[in-house]
Image: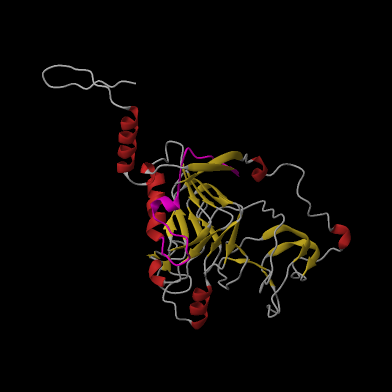
Amino acid sequence: MELKAKRLGKTQPQVINRVAVWAFMVGFVVMLGGAEGRIVKSFSTFEYSAMSCRAHSASVTEFGAVGDGKTLNTRAFAAAIAHLSRYSAVGGGLLYVPAGRWLTGTFNLTSHFTLYLHKQAVLLASQDVRDWPLSDPLPSYGHGREAPGGRYMSFIFGTNLTDVIITGDNGKIDGQGGVWWTKFHKGSLKYTRPHLIEIMHSRSIQISNLTLLNSPFWTVHPVYKTAIGRGAYVKDIYVKRMTMHTMKWVSKWMAITNRIPTLITIRKRPGDTFTGICIANVTLGMTPKHKKYPWTCTDVQGMTSGVTPSPCDSLPDQGPEKISACDFPADSLPIDEVKLKQCSYRINYF
């Protein structure tokens, strides 16, 4: 290969050594700096299933994150998500969290975005209250749920989003919520506790293949989808293959005015009634000091069969012969119509 250089006054061909050209190009790329300026020595790929694949990707380590469980990585996560948000309209972005223990404060998601956790990755929520900004109370409450003022922002938060995926190879998101529960029981909190994941005013959200641990408050809190009041219109709820253990309460079905805290709550507007409830072949493990009446039901109608612990009187047990009465409908459910794609991600080694 020959490159010709032009001198002032006259033109004279000059041959530039190929090695010199390559060294110049490498030096130029490295001087660009940042994640795009590093030389990839090797790489590997893996596949995963998701509603949407992404055209652009980055690892949180490219933005200075350190997975030692001690270094606070809030700025690194914020910078990585801000960088990938630039690709929202051109294929979206994926943020890869490799193996490690990644301590961070709260962070916001963006549209057309995937957060992917390696199977040995653990997102650790900071236990320093200063890493949890305050936010306004939910409009439908008008005040904090546990205190008159606002509330702490949820660990992973997003609002007015479309096409967001939080997934992985069974990586963990650990809210390290013990400190929050201690403060709550002591009555020392001035503001309402944060949730582990909260998504507001959003659509096309996938949360899958993760282990969610130790939330400071509710674990997953989706609110304000389409309806008046606090949330969406809810219908045709089906649950498969879910394991619950060390429960204080089994469930609460109640009017929206009931504020008793619980682990599983389905609320409604006052005056409405839950009908057509069917629960069969279910066993729930309780804590040694569980509530005397683990079920709380108000304005509920339905049936059960083979349920332990015994449900409330509004959901009478119909005997083992009715255990198939709660089979899923033969017709496909809306969730069955969601088509997952096989996506791939390339891990670069520098």
- Farthest right residue in view: 321
| Res 83 visible | yes
Quadrant of the image for the N terminus? top left
- Farthest bottom residue in view: 186
- Asked whether 90 falls inside the magenta stretch, the response is no
Residue at the image point whose x is 46% and y is 65% from the top: 141
Q: In this view, does 298 lie to the left or right of 40?
A: right
Vertical order, 72 against 347 (above or below): below
- Asked whether 65 falls inside the magenta stretch, the response is yes
* Residue 51 on image: x %, y %: 57, 42
| Res 268 visible | no
* Residue 30 on image: x %, y %: 33, 42
- Farthest left residue in view: 9
Q: In this view, does 124 lie to the left or right of 254?
A: left
Residue at the image point whose x is 49% and y is 42% from the top: 42
> Closer to the camera, 245 or 294?
245
Q: In this view, does 232 lie to the left or right of 105?
A: right
Q: Give the range drawn in magenta.
A: 47-73
**Colour scheme of the picture:** secondary structure
Residue at the image point whose x is 72% and y is 58% from the top: 277
Q: Is residue 134 left or right of residue 15?
A: right
* Residue 117 on image: x %, y %: 54, 53
Image quarter of residue 239: bottom right
* Residue 72 on image: x %, y %: 41, 64
> Closer to the camera, 81 or 41?
41
> Closer to the camera, 257 or 73?
73
Vertical order, 39 against 238 (above or below): above
Image quarter of residue 142: bottom left
Residue at the image point whose x is 19% and y is 21% from the top: 6
Question: Total of numbered circles in the picture?
Answer: 0
